Image: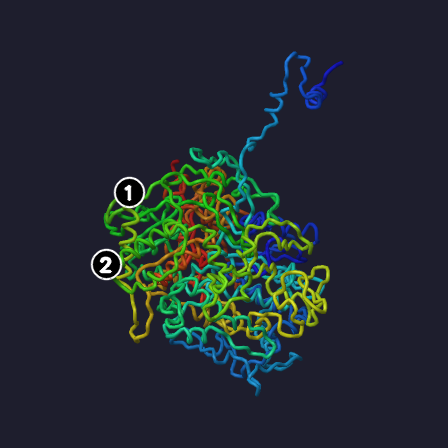
Amino acid sequence: MTNHWKDIKNADVVLVMGANPAENHPCGFKWALEARDENGAKLLTIDPRFTRTSAVADKHLQIRPGSDIAILGGLIRHILTNDLHHADYVRAHTNASFIISGDFGFEDGLFSGFEEAGSRYDKTSWSYQRAADGYVRRDPTLEDPQCVFQLLRRHYDRYTPAMVAQIAGCSEQKFLEMADIICSTGRADRVGTIMYAVGWTMHTVGSQIIRTGAILQLLLGNIGRPGGGINALRGHANVQGATDHAIVAGILPGYLKVPTPEQTTLAEHLEASTPQPLVPDTVNYWGNYPKFMVSLLKAWFGDSATTANEFGYHYLGKPDGDATWLSIWDEAYHGRLEGFITLGFNPLLAGPDIPRLLQSMSRLKWMTVIDPFMLDSAEFWKAPGMNPAEIDTEVLYLPTTHWIERDGSFTNSGRWAQWKEKAIDPPDGVRSDTWVLSELFWRVKELYQQDGGAYDEPIQNLTWNYLNPREPLLTELAKEINGYDHATGQLLSSFGQLQADGGTSSGNWLYTGSYTEAGNMMARRGTADPTGLGMHHEWAFSWPANRRVLYNRASADAEGRPWDPTRAGIAWTGREWIGDVPDYGRTTPPDAAGAFIMTEEGVARLFSSQMADGPFSEHYEPVESPTVNALHESVPVNPVINWYDGVRETLASEGDDFPHACTIYRVVEHEHFVTQNVPLLVEAMPDFFIEIPEGLAAEKGIENGGRARVWSKRGEVEGVAIVTKRIKPLLVNGRTVWTVGIPVHWGFAGGTSNTHASMANLLTPFIGDANTRCPEFKAFLVNIARAEPRAT
Amino acid sequence: MAISRRTFLKASVAGGVVVSALGFDLKPAYAAVRQLKIRNAREYKTVCPYCAVGCGTIAYVHGSGGLNTTKTIIHVEGDPDNPINGGTLCPKGASQMGLAISPRLRKSPMYRGAGASEWREVDWDFAMDWFARKFKASRDATFVEQDSQGRTVNRCNGIAWVGSATVANEDAYLITKTMRAMGLTYIDHQARI
């Protein structure tokens, strides 16, 4: 989230799209209801289903799964053709005025620079024009035909209401009614927010859906303002924190970059990772990258990190290309992965394409599963259709503690790191994750000392200065994350103190200030709210720097006056900024630099060359789509997604009979799979079901409460049929398209519920987003039939 | 004077030791009715384990935690001071004690050998020895110090680590630190999906 949960109460318009917070984030969603009830805010949902959120919304628009960019692109066009953008904001705080290379173009579904052979873009033409001084050329009038504003207008001009309706299957009229409300916030005195979740990310164009949402919010002047922003609603208690701390391919803690093989020295890595300013008036905060990176290496390798060994730069592995989720499974599928370790995660059920994952697991030499509960993943060799005698994978299951038996901090969607106390002791025989990890570390380290082996210098030199080295305290780790000044031995209070010369250490610069000499800031419980906006600066710690709204310099105009004094993010008094912790120097005058301190442009990017699949977004169909791409038939799907070997054969193709769109989702009684271990919740929502629109059910002779079977090219599920009015037929490109809904919560192991191993991810395709490789769980094709009742 | 239930209760509260018209003191019985089950429980401020709203919760625990005592969780409810949830919880959060004491929590490491059709219970020493030896063997077998172009890459190709979005920040950090130092590059968690 750019903002945070309670801040949603400050909005005038709340657009919920790609999320269903009434069901999946109920207590956070209360702030949307507060905005509706106390502020008169309009609450809107755009979704393939009429959800529980829709049930309390002012308006709902049903769309086809995978048509999000068409909708959002249509909204951008609606803004630009009707001059609804927040003109002063756009001019002051975005790169609308930046001039783009004359070689940039877009034709028939492809941006300039497409290289067919590599299925990638050469981005040379996606660059800014430079003036004689080396900085980017800008046109403050926004009239230059090559300026970002004009390119944006031209690009989205194709997304007419008629085109939107044709792609998404909604009515033009309903789209326009929705558009009028959403686009009503492009003014200083109004502000709107977007709440989204994995309904946006889980597509082959997921990152671009979010970017389109960001472009929309920038045009409306809603980023950086209380009541605004673009807010990802995350699904696990600490998915934000585990990402910040980089249990993620491609990044190191604090969103530093994993070194690549080309970066053969630390200096090369730092140079490649440290952006240069593109305009004279930018803070370009990532210019501090070397301080963050060297401080991280010092935290990890301590006295062994010296200038002589480049602070241990070569202790870090340089990956051979992509190392994300799908690539991990692909390595296993091809028998190249020997060992697989999973902690606090049920990866088999998480999918996609469970039949493929089962084969992949069978080709591992060994697997270790660390979790409080026995998992389907650990028992994959018992899955329906598997023959244990033919599976040589050795599996170790380790029972570990869960949240209430440990202290430590969780960072919520709104970036608030809240310390939790340990309430009870684990039962005898159960160890903590920290203990397991430490024990593994020590035993491996000692084996290397005894027997030697592959390059073990980083293991021998890893800092491990904990009171109990076999089970560090989480407070010790919290302090290591915060970081120290080595000259004084004191905990740091701000990442502004970090140095690139090895004089400081910090395990994650974003969390510097979270555990200082003044104590554990994450454990703070002050409830004061002097701004009245729900910022609560004395409650817990919000990264970075206890800032509650990211990019809050943009909540004020060029002179530092809040766009809306009744909802001021920060305000310039003439001497300093007051309000939220400023995203800017506290005493830096408003005209000193651009509002977006993290970009080398100093402003937000309406046009961005950072993406793999285009500087603007474009509607591409899901890889399994019930229709052609109405914008460009020759380029139906995202042209730069990665196709793993053998995956094309697993997708519905010409002549296959998979006519219906399908999407998957969660229900309030369950959280993924773990709640299958909670008797009350199993009782409340006991069984797998299939949500089927009335007309389709009638056509197939399926009765409400009867049974149905749904299958894709990859697998099949069977369950109770819930025949619903909540999903209507859609007219897409002149053809009726039905959408079927499937919840994700069931597996085969343990079995508190009567599910017949109906796992949603038996159906989903093994393909991911062009930027993140997040799988396309949310839009694929199926067929459906009535199934006969089963004996219970 | 007719004594209604209300005035009777008033009298017994206000009057200290009062012998009622019934001839015996009802005060202890009254007090027992008023006792909550969380009386004498210790409060621990924690955070809901499910979604990422981050609702504050209070766990009520019996037992001092001292030697020879066992802490028993008796109730979990929303933390009214927490500005995010203000004491409210959803159906999952409200029943989280059911997760804390689920009958399906496991207490022993288990091992499944190649081709076996059942688990075998093992002790922690066996388990961690097996784990460390497997880890080292695969690391040794798949470690690449220099790639085909002679560049130092120092990576372990043959082991992947996934998870977790359910552990605390401090454990998440320790996972990253340890696995990156081991040379792993196949590291990911629920955020990807």
* Quadrant the N terminus of chain A occupies: bottom right
Q: Residues within 10 Å of mark 2 (few under 14, many from 20)?
A: few
Closest to the observer, B181 or A460: A460
Q: Nearer the viewer, residue A137 or A642?
A: A137
Q: Is residue A321 above or below residue A13?
A: below
Outermost front residue = A488
Res. B122 mark: 1
A166 or A465, nearer to the observer: A465
**Where's residue A444, x and y in %?**
30, 56
Q: Is residue A728 among the parts visible in the rendering? A: no
Q: Which residue corresponds to the image point at 54% horizontal and 54% vertical from the top-left? A: A417
Q: Give the letter of the chain under mark 2.
A: A
Residue kind at label 1, given as amino acid type: Val
* Quarter of the C terminus of chain A within the rendering: top left
Disc 2 element: helix
Residue A363 in picture, x, y percent from top left: 28, 56
Task: Report the residue that reaches farthest toward the right.
Answer: B1
Q: Nearer the viewer, mark 1 or mark 2?
A: 2
Residue A457 position within the rendered picture, expressed as x and y whole percent measured from the top left: 32, 64
Q: Residue at x 46, y 66 (%)?
A: A295
Quadrant position of residue B186: bottom left
Is A600 displayed left or right of B174 in the figure? right
Residue at numbered disc 2: A451
Q: Residue at x 41, y 47 (%)?
A: A709
Give above or below for B184 relative to A715: below
Vertical relation: B112 (above or below) A641 = above
Q: Are marks 1 and 2 on the same chain?
A: no
Determine the chain carrying the residue at label 1. B
Closest to the observer, A691 or A455? A455
